[in-house]
Image: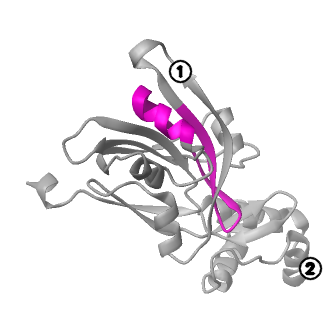
Amino acid sequence: MTARRAQYLELADRLATRWESLPPGTQVESEHQLAAEFAVNRLTAREAVRELERRQRVRRVAGSGTFTAHRLEYRVEVGDPPSFRRVVAELGYEPGVLNLGSRWSGRGQTREFVISRILTVDGLIASTSLDRFPREVGIAVERLGVAGGSIVEALRRVGCAPVRSSVRVLMDLPDERVAGQLGFQASPPPVWRLESVTTDGARGPVIHRSTSWMRPDMFALTIELGASALQ
């Protein structure tokens, strides 16, 4: 271990202790301020902040600064309707949606209505998602114009009883498109990828499939299988 590496790691540990009690989303000192306060060069301060970013303790936002990471406890449960808005709001934060566009895919009875969106927490990019609806459900959902609203509420408004019937969770390196939508400038870290299936009632037909990529510095996922899944 070189002297410079030891120095930035030591600084990272000190900063982690200093910032751990700050509320999520708090802006912290700039690299320039840290270099001056701790009498180190700018490169050492930058590497210390990058180390904390790798540890998912802080988040750097281009043009805005560095903020303490949220790491919100996001529970994923089979049987529960998937609702980003509900989960974030219940945790005391403000959910938001940026519609990237919608389109129809496929032919005939296999056509799907597809919505692409970026989801935010207190204005910070948190997740990006692709939501797919089979033909009949998609026609009804498209008429509602809900690309910027709640998917679960839209499904209920068209007469469905949404229930998450299955979910697959992975840690995955995002491709260039997804990384850009999540706000990563270069060398993105692995992110959470959720592949979820929603049915109309517990044993009904599939009415919604979604793939979501979630920033790990925004969410700490808890996956609950339920007693029946463990038997």
Decide: is 130 above or below 149.
Answer: above
Rendering coords of residue 226 (x, y %): 19, 60
In magenta stretch: residue 119: yes
Residue found 58% across the figure and 62% down from its top: 218
Q: Is residue 73 visible?
A: yes
Magenta-tinted stretch: 114-143
Q: Is residue 187 visible?
A: no
Which one is earlier in the sequence, the residue at label 1 or at label 2?
A: 2
Residue situated in front as seen by the camera: 127 or 13: 127
Residue found 46% across the figure and 55% down from its top: 153
State if disc 2 and disc 1 touch (CB < 8 Å): no
For numbered disc 1, what is the local secondary structure?
strand
Q: Quadrant of residue 122?
A: bottom right
Residue found 55% across the figure and 44% down from its top: 144
Does residue 137 appear to the left or right of 53 in the view shown?
Answer: left
Decide: is 21 above or below 138.
Answer: below
For numbered disc 2, what is the local secondary structure?
helix
Tally the marks.
Answer: 2
Does residue 205 appear to the left or right of 51 in the view shown?
Answer: left
Screen quadrant of the N terminus: bottom right
Label 2: which residue? 36
Rendering coords of residue 159 (x, y %): 36, 47
What amino acid does circle 2 point to? Answer: Ala
Residue situated in front as seen by the camera: 128 or 69: 128
Decide: is 8 above or below 223.
Answer: below
Q: Residues within 10 Å of mark 1 (few under 14, many from 20)?
A: some
Label 1: which residue? 105
Q: Residues within 10 Å of mark 2 (few under 14, many from 20)?
A: few
What amino acid does circle 1 point to? Answer: Ser
Screen quadrant of the C terminus: bottom left
In magenta stretch: residue 147: no
Residue situated in front as seen by the camera: 214 or 92: 92
